[in-house]
Amino acid sequence: MPDQDPNSKPNLLRSALKIWLLPAVLILAAQGAVLHVLSIPEKGVSIPQLQNVPAQLGAWKTVSESTLEPAVQEYLKPDSYILRDYANPASGSAVNLFVAYFKSLQSGYGPHSPSVCLPGSGWLVRERTILNISVPGRAAAIPVNKFLLDKAGQHILVLYWYQNDRNVWAEEFQGKLRLLPDLIKYKRSDVSLVRLVQPLAGSDADQALTECQRFARLVFPALSEDFRRAD
């Protein structure tokens, strides 16, 4: 048997990426051209009342609630948001919940990816991957971004995903791919960013990940109900 070329796998990977990326780029370009020429009317939707997310989720209880700094709120322009700290006395865990809802992506405003914002704030990415988490009310698991980050001796775990009443996705570009089809089919382009941040004791993330996934399973149904009410 002839020796395998050690460069064959990277070459195959690059070829596969090119084959996959080209249609995505063409779709995004076509959508951009259409939306540049047309403004597709959207049906009126109620803004979800994110403050209705329960103050207690299982063993997790709200310990504080904050507002965005005026400059940050002006930059993001969410139509609704929640920024809340939960604590689980039984496990000693704490999670910061941030949800930002945007009723239309045609406005030019929308979610800003934590994968850009956090490193831009000085956090170093130690690990990033996409997990699938089973949640109540859905047959299929939801895709969730997982980041481990370090900064000045601090360590955090971040889970985040994008959600509306129709879909849940992890990768930012998928929201752009869905924009025109959602506008045509549903007359809507609303989306929300859901982000969980949990401080780590040391650099061991296994227990924190278990706790954060438990919290995700509790908060997901509450958010889904809010987005259904906005339909």
Image: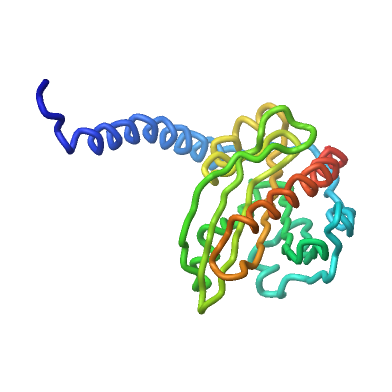
On the image, the x and y values in percent for residue 224 come to 80, 41
How many discs mark residues in the rendered view? 0
Looking at the picture, tell me which residue is in the foreground, 19 or 134.
134
Q: Residue at x 70, y 54 (%)?
A: 211
- Given the current orientation, which residue lies at the most extreme left position? 2
Q: Residue at x 66, y 38 (%)?
A: 168
Looking at the picture, tell me which residue is in the foreground, 186 or 90.
90
Name the side, left or right, on which 59 lies relative to 19. right
User: Which image quadrant for residue 206?
Assistant: bottom right
On the image, the x and y values in percent for residue 98 come to 72, 60
- Given the current orientation, which residue lies at the most extreme bottom position? 152
Looking at the picture, tell me which residue is in the foreground, 75 or 55.
55
Name the side, left or right, on which 43 lies relative to 149. right
Colouring used for the render: rainbow
- Given the current orientation, which residue lies at the most extreme top position? 1
Looking at the picture, tell me which residue is in the foreground, 142 or 153.
153
Q: Quadrant of the N terminus?
A: top left
On the image, the x and y values in percent for residue 185 come to 68, 26
On the image, the x and y values in percent for residue 80 come to 78, 57
Q: Is residue 175 above or below residue 81?
A: above
Q: Quadrant of the C terminus?
A: top right
